[in-house]
Image (spheres, helix red, strand yellow):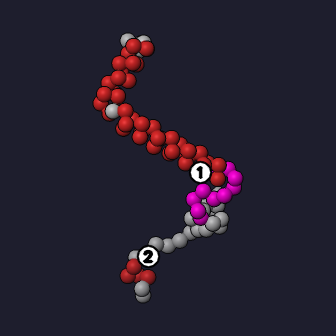
């Protein structure tokens, strides 16, 4: 029950090709390659110091470590008064 031999993997590959077809597998490979390429480009822009999310530094969405923001939650009817 351990590892499979080369013949087992060839049979699995043959079944996958028969089920999906070579054209669909080729398209899947191209899509995966373009996704990986886009991910690598995104990582390069992040390493260069450009913001990856598109938010400017100092926006309220960023949290500063060590500081607590206090606030009070009000319903819409209370805030109109």
The mark tally for this picture is: 2
Q: Does residue 15 show up magenta in the picture?
A: no
> Could you say which is closer to the camera, residue 2 or residue 21?
21
Counting residues from the start of the chain, the first of labels 1 and 2 encountered is 1
Disc assigned to residue 81: none
**Against 52, is 40 above or below?**
above
Residue 5 spot, x, y in % from top left: 42, 12
- Residue 68 in view: no
SS label for mark 2: loop
Residue 12 spot, x, y in % from top left: 36, 22
The residue carrying mark 2 is: 74
Q: Tell me: 58 left or right of 30.
A: right
Q: Does residue 50 show up magenta in the picture?
A: yes
Q: Tell me: 52 left or right of 2.
A: right
> Could you say which is closer to the camera, residue 32 or residue 76?
32
The residue carrying mark 1 is: 42
Main SS, magenta residues? loop
Give the residue at x 61% y 68%.
59
Query: Please, which residue is most extreme toward the right here?
Result: 48
- The CA distance from mark 1 to mark 2 is 40 Å
The quarter of the picture where the N terminus appears is top left
Circle 1 crowding by C-alpha within 10 Å: few under 14, some 14–19, many from 20: few
Read off the magenta span.
Answer: 46-55
Q: Tell me: 46 left or right of 75.
A: right
Image quarter of residue 2: top left
């Amino acid at each position: 029950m351990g590892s499979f031999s080369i013949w087992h993997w060839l049979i699995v590959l043959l079944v996958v090709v028969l089920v999906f077809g070579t054209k669909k597998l080729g398209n899947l490979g191209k899509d995966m390659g373009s996704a990986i390429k886009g991910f690598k480009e995104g990582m390069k822009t992040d390493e260069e110091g450009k913001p990856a999310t598109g938010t400017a530094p100092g926006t309220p969405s960023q949290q500063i470590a060590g500081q607590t923001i206090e606030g009070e939650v009000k319903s819409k009817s209370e805030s109109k008064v």
